[in-house]
Amino acid sequence: MNDKKYLYFSLIILAIAITVFAINRFVVRSNIRVVERKKEIIFININTANKNKLSKIPGIGESTAEKIIFYRTENGEFEKIEDIMNIKGIKEKKFNKIKEYIYIENADSEN
């Protein structure tokens, strides 16, 4: 009788191990897909981008995007990407996080 209990116990442990392994592989694969989606390549011209495009820059929400557009309207095009630090809420720390996603090109030269 002890042999049967041992066999059943071993089968239960094996079933649990297989289930945990399968769930772990599913979760890892799901996380990889999510990470791949988040690593969308973004390179935005801050002189011509609309609010929707500016909002795609990591760390730039709709409010900051509106500030960028307002600044552009009032002061003209940015001359260098560092000029974006003139926007309230974008200082050196945030600039260092977003600088790889932005570039400058005059609106006239894009056409």
Image (cartoon, rainbow, N blue to C red):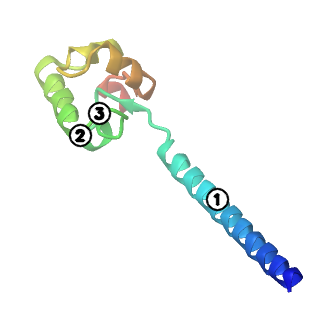
Determine whether label 3 and label 2 are within 8 Å by CB: no
* Residue 11 visible in the shown view: yes
Q: Nearer the viewer, residue 67 or 34?
A: 34
On screen, residue 51 versus residue 75, left or right, reads right
In the image, what residue occupies the spot 27% across and 18% down? Answer: 84
Give the residue type at disc 2: Lys
Kindly report which numbered mark, 1 or 3, lies closer to the viewer in this rendering: 1
28 versus 61 height, above or below: below
**Residue 41 % position (x, y):** 50, 39
Q: Secondary structure at mark 3?
A: loop
Q: Which residue is identified by label 2?
A: 51
Give the residue type at disc 1: Asn
In the image, what residue occupies the spot 18% across and 19% down? Answer: 76
Q: Quadrant of residue 110?
A: top left
Q: Secondary structure at mark 2?
A: helix
Q: Which residue is identified by label 1?
A: 24
**Residue 72 % position (x, y):** 18, 24
Query: Residue 60 got which mark?
Result: 3
Give the residue type at disc 3: Ile
Assign the N terminus to one quadrant of the image.
Answer: bottom right
How packed mark 2 is, by other alpha carbons closer than 10 Å (few <14, some 14-19, many 20 or more), is some
75 versus 29 height, above or below: above
How packed mark 1 is, by other alpha carbons closer than 10 Å (few <14, some 14-19, many 20 or more), is few
Estimate the spatial distance between the alpha carbons at disc 1 and disc 3, rounded to whole Å: 34 Å
First in sequence, mark 2 or 1: give its number: 1
**Residue 50 % position (x, y):** 25, 39
